[in-house]
Image (cartoon, rainbow, N blue to C red):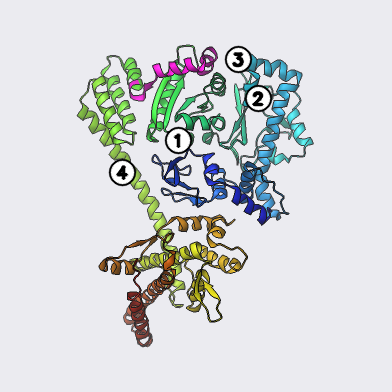
């Protein structure tokens, strides 16, 4: 395991804007930075990075955390791996303590696969440059394609020999376990750089091919593509790494690691089809280019681009296959809110050949002169195919309308409707009605899906809330079906606890009251002591973790609650802490009513009103108690109804005898709440 001191050094060195900036294009907005969230699909940036607080927060999907948490989420790796990645970025050396067997195994699966890929990548490059076969076949091929040596090295191109399975032997000599070399589709473990025959022999998957390594956005070697050079009808032209624990071909874009900064700087991305297209354009001086890798474009790939720019220019061959490939991806780009242009190169040319015969300036001039917005491109293409055939023209109009309906921005939609009506010689109102109909149908479909998801979430919440009320009802057994009022009370109870946790996370170590021995009790210690004195349990296991962690560590030298919880190795704790730091304190229903009547500000930002802690802490504790007493009174009322229906008069007398005490407690709390309105 990584020593705590080293983890602290990594947290201290990591600048959240630099770590996140490797994956997301960020723009300054006041004291914060804004970008498109990499964790969910959005067209308007709600992903906020706060350099001063060292946190990120998406106000769309709710994801939040610190730099290490961001790497864990984006790379789908464990805490230790994320710390190592950031340590490497900031040149911090890590010496690990011995891990438990379980921790070691969990880390090995991903990390060992990356190590195997890195070894294979260097091995393929060594074969290309230092073996006779590699130089004669692989290097000669790249040179014939017009690539310079610096370009070949930049993209880490390699070669795999034809005979003898030398990579498998080299991996075995190095001691790599077979499960990380050969892919197992059932467990999804194994890089697949080698395959396994039916008789149990391990063989090189990419033999007799030139190698194109594929990298993640952060630069890790995640997979390979191998191109055969000899004509062989029995095997495919390309062989790719299989999907695995670390690689999914639908989630990666070739060249993005090398292109991301150029894309963000130009605010434009060129999309091509193959690896050689990307490499040749880079060599020509055009670096803001990526490739789908010869596979059908996917939404995850489109959203990768969306992190860096909303502007895309699709470059395809001028033949029929290239044209229809361009059409396939357009609607997906539109749905994601892109500004889409299409460029078809001259017949017989592809981006690779065109880049080899033109410099960057001439290439860009050609693009600017020949790029077409998607509607004109699609309309012109389909019009030529439809000719004068009425049915084909009707299908053409439907096809164009379906594309326009994908555009989320209403103004852009209207511009394209008008333009298409003029060019297709059809009434604008008719096109508008059709677009509106398609969007309504899609909205209804999305609403149904959303309602189904909400219904499932509500069922899960009701089960959790039932358990909460059971703990806080004084041990009275609960029915499985809870009334709607009970669900609302459980939500209010959670809100009350969350407000107290917010104080603990932000100000937990601050002195609150002076004790008789002239020492002070802190905000966190006072809140926890009050909860324990009243026998109040947390309604949420994660909330209880926060309370336990504060009690265990508050006495440590230099303890600061905000940093302790924000940078906590438990990602659940750190994520909740970031939420609590980022949220504004919302006054409760009780407090809000009185605030309105007395013309008091209804929202208090705890970040700037720490002076009111001596009022806020008891206020929030009283609100929590008020909610709990109401829950108990309502439950008693329900039990009294049941006792009456069952003629259980003994239980009725017992309940009636305890009712006055509960009502008196409620009245006392109400009076105290009424006297504690904060004025600013």
Q: Position of residue 609 (x, y in %)?
A: 41, 63
> Of discs 4 and 2, which sits in the foreground?
2
Read off the residue under disc 3. 146
Mark number, residue 587: none
Does residue 169 appear to the left or right of 496 in the view shown? right
Q: CA distance from mark 1 to mark 4?
A: 26 Å
Residue 156 quadrant: top right
Q: Residue at x 32, y 75 (%)?
A: 674
**In this picture, is 179 found above or below 369?**
below
**In this picture, is 509 found above or below 348?**
below
Question: Which mark is first along the chain, 3 or 4?
Answer: 3
Q: What are the residue bounds of the magenta stretch?
A: 350-376
Figure disc tally: 4
Label 4: which secondary element: helix
Does residue 455 appear to the left or right of 526 in the view shown? left
Label 3: which secondary element: loop
Label 1: which secondary element: helix
Dots 1, 4 in contact, CB < 8 A:
no
């Amino acid at each position: 395991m990584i020593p705590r001191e080293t983890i602290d050094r990594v947290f201290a060195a990591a600048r959240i804007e630099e770590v996140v900036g490797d994956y997301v294009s960020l723009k300054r907005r006041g004291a914060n930075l804004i970008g498109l969230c990499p964790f969910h699909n959005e067209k308007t940036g709600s992903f906020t990075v706060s350099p001063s607080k060292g946190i990120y927060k998406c106000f769309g999907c709710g994801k939040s955390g610190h730099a290490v948490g961001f790497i864990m989420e984006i790379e789908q790796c464990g805490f230790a791996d994320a710390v190592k990645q950031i340590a490497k970025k900031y040149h911090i050396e890590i010496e690990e303590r011995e891990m438990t067997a379980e921790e070691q195994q969990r880390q090995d699966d991903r990390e060992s696969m990356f190590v195997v890929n890195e070894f294979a990548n260097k091995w393929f490059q060594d074969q290309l440059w230092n073996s006779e076969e590699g130089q004669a076949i692989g290097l000669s091929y790249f040179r014939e394609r017009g690539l310079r040596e610096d370009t070949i090295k930049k993209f880490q191109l390699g070669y795999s020999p034809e005979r003898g399975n030398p990579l498998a032997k080299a991996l075995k000599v190095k001691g790599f376990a077979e499960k990380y070399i050969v892919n197992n589709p059932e467990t999804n473990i194994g890089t697949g750089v080698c395959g396994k025959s039916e008789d149990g022999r391990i063989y090189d998957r990419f033999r007799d091919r030139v190698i194109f390594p594929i990298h993640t956005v952060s630069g890790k070697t995640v997979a390979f593509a191998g191109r055969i050079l000899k004509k062989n009808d029995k095997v495919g032209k390309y062989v790719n790494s299989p999907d695995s624990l670390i690689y999914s071909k639908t989630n990666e874009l070739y060249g993005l690691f090398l292109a991301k900064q150029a894309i963000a700087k130009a605010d434009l991305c060129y999309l091509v089809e193959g690896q050689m297209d990307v490499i040749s354009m880079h060599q020509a001086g055009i670096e803001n280019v990526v490739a789908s890798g010869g596979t059908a474009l996917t939404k995850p790939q489109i959203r990768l681009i969306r992190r860096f720019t909303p502007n895309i220019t699709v470059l395809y061959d001028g033949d029929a296959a290239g044209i229809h490939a361009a059409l396939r991806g357009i609607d997906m780009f539109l749905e994601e809110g892109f500004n889409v242009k299409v460029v078809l190169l001259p017949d017989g040319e592809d981006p690779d050949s065109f880049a080899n015969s033109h410099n960057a300036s001439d290439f860009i001039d050609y693009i600017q002169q020949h790029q077409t917005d998607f509607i004109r491109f699609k309309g012109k293409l389909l019009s030529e195919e439809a000719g004068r055939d009425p049915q084909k023209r009707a299908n053409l109009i439907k096809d164009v309308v379906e594309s326009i309906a994908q555009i989320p921005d209403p103004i852009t939609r209207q511009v394209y409707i008008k333009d298409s009506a003029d060019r297709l010689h059809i009434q604008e109102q008719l096109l508008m009605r059709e677009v509106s109909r398609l969007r309504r149908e899609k909205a209804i479909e999305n609403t149904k899906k959303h309602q189904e998801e909400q219904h499932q979430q509500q069922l899960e919440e009701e089960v959790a809330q039932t358990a909460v009320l059971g703990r806080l009802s004084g041990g009275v057994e609960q029915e499985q079906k809870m009334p709607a009022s009970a669900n609302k009370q459980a939500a209010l109870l959670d809100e009350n606890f969350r407000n107290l946790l917010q104080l603990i996370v932000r100000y937990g170590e601050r002195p609150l009251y002076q004790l008789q021995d002239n020492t002070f009790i802190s905000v966190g210690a006072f809140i926890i002591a009050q909860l324990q004195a009243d026998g109040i349990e947390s309604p949420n296991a994660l909330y209880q973790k926060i309370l336990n962690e504060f009690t265990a560590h508050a006495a440590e030298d230099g303890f600061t609650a905000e940093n302790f919880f924000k940078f906590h190795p438990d990602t659940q704790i750190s994520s909740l802490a970031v939420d609590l730091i980022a949220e504004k304190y919302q006054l409760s229903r009780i407090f809000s009513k009185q605030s309105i009547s007395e013309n008091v500000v209804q929202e208090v930002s705890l970040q700037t009103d720490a002076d009111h802690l001596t009022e806020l802490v008891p206020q929030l504790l009283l609100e929590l108690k008020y909610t709990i007493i109401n829950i108990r009174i309502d439950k008693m009322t329900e039990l009294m109804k049941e006792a009456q229906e069952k003629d259980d008069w003994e239980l009725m007398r017992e309940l009636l005898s305890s009712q006055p005490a509960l009502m008196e407690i409620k009245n006392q709390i109400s009076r105290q709440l009424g006297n504690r309105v904060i004025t600013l």
